[in-house]
Image: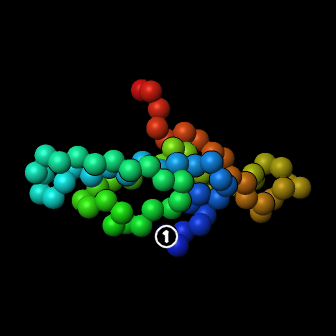
Amino acid sequence: MGADRDAIPFGGNLVICCSTGNGGDGRFSCLITDEIPDLNLVRSGQAFPMFVYEYETPAVIPAKAGIQTQTRRESIGNG
């Protein structure tokens, strides 16, 4: 699988991979995985993670200066 383990640091994340087929021939496929997918999992497709993680470095609190935390946010919504 993929090499970037920081992209999904905790369990419980899903990735939806969709393909529109080779050259737009109208064929559609979709896979879902709980592992970091290879770039070639689906041909000419896209991957959509359920959650993305963003690093935050608190600069206001001196006791926590230089400590990075991660915030999880949903990337697939109803909107």
In the displayed structure, 20 sits above or below 22; it is above
Position of 72 with respect to 68 (left or right) is: left
Location of residue 22 in the rendering, given as x and y in whole percent from the top left corner: 15, 58
Q: Which residue is mark 1?
A: 1
Location of residue 75 in the rendering, given as x and y in whole percent from the top left corner: 49, 41
Q: Decide if residue 3 is in sight here.
A: yes
Amino acid, disc 1:
Met
Give me the residue at 45% from left, 62% from top.
Answer: 37
Q: In front here: 60 or 11? A: 11
Position of 47 with respect to 53 (left or right) is: left
Q: Quadrant of residue 6?
A: bottom right
Give me the residue at 54% from left, 54% from top.
Answer: 34
Give me the residue at 17% from left, 48% from top.
Answer: 27
Q: In front here: 24 or 60? A: 24
Location of residue 21 in the rendering, given as x and y in whole percent from the top left corner: 19, 54
Q: Residue furthest right?
A: 63
Q: In front here: 35 or 62? A: 35
Q: Secondary structure at mark 1?
A: loop
Q: Quadrant of residue 39?
A: bottom left
Q: Quadrant of residue 74?
A: top right
Q: In front here: 56 or 18? A: 18
Position of 28 with respect to 63 (left or right) is: left
Q: Decide if residue 52 is in sight here.
A: no
